[in-house]
Amino acid sequence: MQEPFIWDNYSDQPYPLKDKNYKKKMRKNEFVSLLKTFFIAIIILPFSIIITPFVKRKKINSSEFFCLGVDCQREGELTLELLKELKIKKVLLRLKLWEMDTLNNLKEFILKCDDKKITLKILQDREHIEDLDLFKKDLELIFTELSEYVDIFEIGSTINRAKWGFFSVDEYNKFYKIAYDLKIQMFPNIKLIGSGVIDFEYHFTSHTLFNFFKYKYDGISALLYVDRRGAPENMQMGFNLSDKIALLSTMTWISRKVKQKIHITETNWPISNTAPYAPTSEHECVNEELYADFMLRYHLLSFASQQVDSVSWHQLIAPGYGLIDNRNGIKIYPAYQTYKFMVENLKDAQFLRLDINRDYYILQCLVNDRVLQIHWTLKPTTLKNEDFFESYSRDGVKIKDETLNIGSSPIYIFIKKAVPLKVNCL
């Protein structure tokens, strides 16, 4: 990565571009593409919103729904131990195109991941965007070395932020087409996903799904952050997380360029008092407990949509937004146990229904022939801990109290015998 683009090793992302004249010039050069994005969006988005209620849910494979982002260059041996302890089946790794010299090390790490399915996010830099021959050469090497071991290749990331190198969707379209053409010509069995739009900015996504470029996706990737809105149930322009997922699913349904598969390849909340490791300002940060609550609820809502094929928690070891803080030794955040208990109980779950009543949520699943209800609410209340309940806290501690305090932290309730599935506690 070359100036004016500078990588921030603390937050694992590029610094904002300081050269405003350069940024303005590059945007001006891509004016036609920006205009196309606008006109495509004003047609596609309203139409998608109208037909969203008619798009049917799929049946999601819960064993492949949970994915964990990992930096194999950070605490490599510990990472492998933690992956084994968490019993996670899917791992997302990153490869920076400006660090092609690390390819062999990445391959060695992948080989140590046993039977885990690997999604590889290929991060771009401006040099590879401008020199597509260089990109093709390096990408061919990546596919040759790793196609046998990688389940999904995500081509590019965060395409709607200039600091990541792209100044228009057409620049990304040309970039992705190099990967697609290589697949058709030399690697027909690999799976490619894109376009890696960050946040709820589907006008960019619409341009990647509806254009005249001759390529296809094996699934859409999205960095669907909602952290700036607070809780995952909060609204943005009239859309909560579930609505955003439904709209994205609708767009994949009507596009001829993509299979109806959604992979959320990055999401988290920044953790308070971790600057400069937090990827945003302190204003967006939450404490360790809320971080665990919000991330769990994000996964539960995504799973309940039955439209998201995988969610990648970003990431395992990262002081500002991960499960582990490695600044001074190893500190395990509460969210680590939250994640472990979630995967343990839901990795083989069959989704039944999601009930919502006045901000009270009950996710119901079938787990090993037992009904599991997961309760949480935005307005704290109580629920009697019935004799036919087997109740656990967010992090897997068994609750024996006569009264369950239902609030921000979801509570797992296994039903011991046949009872009506809907628990009315309001």
Image (cartoon, rainbow, N blue to C red):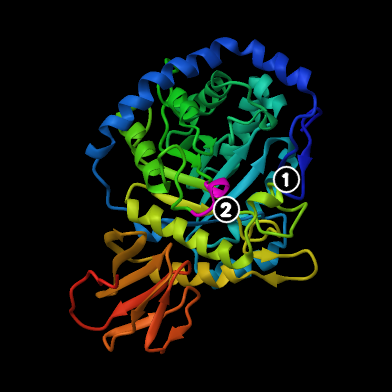
Rendered location of residue 354, percent (x, y): 29, 59
Q: Nearer the viewer, residue 105 or 227?
A: 227
Element under label 2? loop
Instruction: Say what secondary structure mark 1 lies in.
Output: helix
| Whether residue 18 is situated above or below residue 12 in the rendered picture | above
Query: Which one is in front, 114 or 360?
Result: 360
Q: For this view, does 276 lie left or right of residue 379?
A: right
Q: Choose top left, top right, bottom left or bottom right for residue 168.
A: top right
Q: Is residue 80 above or below residue 145?
A: below
The question of residue 228 being in magenta is answered with yes
Question: Crowdedness of circle 2 by 10 Å Cα count: few (<14), some, many (20+)?
Answer: many
Indicate the position of residue 353 as horizontal and vertical percent values.
26, 60
| The stretch drawn in magenta includes residue 237 | no
Q: Is residue 179 above or below residue 87?
A: above
Q: Which residue is mark 2?
A: 268
- Residue hosting label 1: 102
Pick whichever, 100 or 311, lies toward us. 311
| Quarter of the image that includes the C terminus | bottom left
Identified at 59% across, 32% down, the residue is 140
Residue range (magenta)? 226-231
Q: Amino acid at mark 2?
A: Asn
From the image, which quarter does the N terminus lie in?
Answer: top right
**Crowd around label 1: few <14 · some 14–19 · many ≥20 (10 Å):** few
Q: Residue at x 76, y 18 (%)?
A: 22
